[in-house]
Amino acid sequence: QSESTEYSWIVEAFGLFDRVGDNKVAYNQIADIMRALGQNPTNKEVKTILGNPSADEMANKRIEFEAFLPMLQTIINSPNKAGFEDYVEGLRVFDKEGNGTVMGAELRIVLSTLGEKMNEAEIDALMAGQEDENGCINYEGFIYSDNFFFQEFDLLTCSDCQLTVFHRGI
């Protein structure tokens, strides 16, 4: 993709949350916009880069696109990003045998009930071809598989806005 297309993608993501039409969004939408751009900031991280606003400010204060860009860059450059080891550690909790595998059925329940819940079709696509004959999944192989979202993001660099974002390859 060209740099102007990538910049347009960022502008479009921001614009989708502009409910007033003034090229601004509410503070409480910043985390959602960043997540739409492939980032995964915590609410605490977002509040910190916004200057720890009150609940009232989160709901009512608005921010322009130009002020949003450096905040997005801060999150992108955050050393707290989840990486391979974080995913392995998270799945290791379900490794009852200590053999590098988790039960596929248990993982399906977790994916459908915790965090950003996935629907059955999304879970089926994610887990396609991952379970062995005993219904177990080697979680390190799973994380590096083409199915896992860790692999679905292509690195995009936008020199116009000095950003590097991860675009979900759909």
Image (cartoon, rainbow, N blue to C red):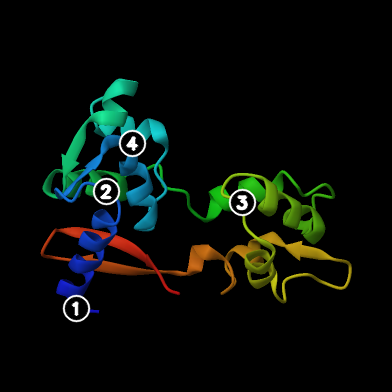
Q: Nearer the viewer, residue 79 or 167?
A: 167
First in residue order: circle 1 vs circle 4: 1
| Image quarter (top left, top right, bottom left or bottom right) of the N terminus | bottom left
Q: Nearer the viewer, mark 1 or mark 4?
A: 4
Along the polypeptide, which appears first: circle 4 or circle 3? 4
Residue matched to label 3: 117
Q: Tell me the distance, in whole angstroms, between the alpha carbons under discs 3 and 2.
A: 26 Å
Q: Badge 1 local density, few (<14 within 10 Å), some, or many (20+)? A: few
Instruction: Using the numbered discs, state the Cα–Cα distance from disc 1 to disc 3 in whole angstroms.
Output: 33 Å
**Amino acid type of the residue tagged 2 in the rendering:** Arg
- At label 3, the amino acid type is Lys
Q: Which residue is mark 2?
A: 19
Q: What residue does disc 1 label?
A: 2
- In front: 21, or 56? 21
Q: Is residue 116 visible?
A: yes
Q: Quadrant of the C terminus?
A: bottom left
Residue at position x 24%, y 50% in the image: 18
Dot 3, how many residues are within 10 Å of its Cα: few (below 14), some (14-19), or many (20+)?
few
The disc labelled 1 sits on which kind of residue?
Answer: Ser
Q: Is residue 53 visible?
A: no
Q: Nearer the viewer, mark 3 or mark 2?
A: 2
Can you identify the residue that label 4 sits on? 28
Left or right relative to 66: residue 75: right
Q: Give the structural element (helix, strand or loop) at label 2.
A: loop
Pointers 1 and 3 in contact (CB under 8 A)? no
Q: Where in the figure is residue 151, as x and y percent of width and height?
A: 49, 68
Give the residue furthest to the right.
134
